[in-house]
Image (cartoon, grey):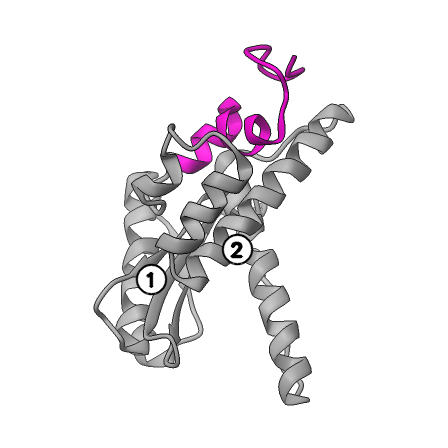
């Protein structure tokens, strides 16, 4: 029996898909209906279906979220507070970006300056955004993370953008997502940050 929800036997699929904390993650707007299909009730069937239906970027993010959900379960079993839904998404996105950046550095034998998150001034919140364009795959994506002055994640999401194929537009849509988050959270004083000067200006 699952020690967290007590609703059913704690299988792998229960932890990464059906347990209430996992359900809340897959209900987020950035995931399509395919990730929520109830008729696929095995790891192999579910992930194989996603592999056929999703592009590589979304599949990588989905698999990373599965790993974070399992890790989150282990943390809670050790009597540590687990991550919230938004924190799961933010951690998964950050982890995947760091991993992909490391692979890219290894392939090109180049070094990049790591951009660290910096806390906002007292009374302000941070709205960080990032757009991504993969020319070789004709895929665009956008992500946004909202944090308070203490660094606590208030909301986060990443999603695929269809029929854009332009890095500047991807960045602009990501910034728009960050601004929408701020409004939905009722924040009045927000510092919007991103790595696209063209969009910020």
Total marks placed: 2
Helix, strand, or loop for circle 1?
helix
Q: Position of 65 compared to 107: left or right?
A: left
**Among the 4 quarters of the image, the one containing residue 172:** bottom left
Q: Could you tell me which residue is drawn at 40 percent across and 58 percent down?
A: 143
Out of 65 and 89, give the one closest to the viewer.
65
Q: Which mark is residue 138?
A: none
Q: Is residue 12 above or below residue 192?
A: above
**Among the 4 quarters of the image, the one containing residue 139:** bottom left
Residue bearing mark 1: 174
Q: Could you tell me which residue is drawn at 57 percent across and 51 percent down?
A: 64
Using the numbered discs, state the Cα–Cα distance from disc 2 to disc 1 in whole angstroms.
14 Å
- Image quadrant holding the C terminus, namely bottom left
Q: Could you tell me which residue is drawn at 50 percent across and 46 percent down?
A: 89
Helix, strand, or loop for circle 2?
helix
Does the segment drawn in magenta span residue 6?
Answer: yes
Q: Is residue 154 above or below residue 92?
A: above
Q: Which mark is residue 93?
A: 2
**Among the 4 quarters of the image, the one containing residue 184:** top left
Q: Position of 158 compared to 84: left or right?
A: left
Q: Position of 178 compared to 150: left or right?
A: left
Using the rendered image of the protein, determine whether residue 119 is visible from the camera's viewpoint.
yes
Out of 89 and 146, give the one closest to the viewer.
89
Furthest residue to the left?
A: 163
- Badge 1 density bin: few <14, some 14–19, many ≥20, Cα 10 Å: many
- Badge 2 density bin: few <14, some 14–19, many ≥20, Cα 10 Å: many
Q: Is residue 62 above or below residue 193?
A: above
- Residue 93 position, x and y percent, is 52, 55
Out of 161 and 119, give the one closest to the viewer.
161
Q: Which residues are magenta?
A: 1-26
Using the rendered image of the protein, determine whether residue 114 is visible from the camera's viewpoint.
no
Q: Could you tell me which residue is drawn at 66 percent across and 30 percent down?
A: 73
């Amino acid at each position: 029996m699952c020690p967290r929800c007590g609703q059913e036997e704690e299988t792998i699929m229960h932890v990464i898909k059906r347990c209430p904390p996992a359900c809340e993650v897959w209900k987020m707007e950035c995931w399509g209906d395919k990730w929520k299909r109830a008729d696929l009730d095995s790891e192999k069937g579910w992930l194989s279906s996603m592999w056929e239906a999703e592009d590589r970027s979304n599949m990588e993010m989905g698999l990373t979220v599965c790993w974070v959900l399992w890790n989150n379960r282990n943390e809670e079993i050790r009597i540590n507070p687990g991550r919230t839904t938004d924190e799961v998404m933010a951690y998964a996105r950050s982890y995947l970006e760091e991993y992909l950046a490391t692979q890219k550095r290894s392939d090109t034998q180049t070094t990049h300056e790591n951009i660290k998150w910096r806390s906002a001034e007292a009374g302000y919140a941070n709205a960080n955004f990032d757009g991504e364009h993969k020319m070789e795959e004709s895929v665009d994506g956008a992500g946004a993370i909202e944090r308070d002055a203490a660094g606590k994640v208030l909301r986060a999401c990443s999603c695929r953008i269809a029929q854009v194929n332009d890095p500047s537009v991807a960045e602009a849509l990501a910034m728009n997502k960050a601004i929408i988050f701020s409004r939905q959270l009722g924040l009045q004083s927000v510092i919007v940050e991103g790595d696209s000067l063209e969009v910020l200006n």
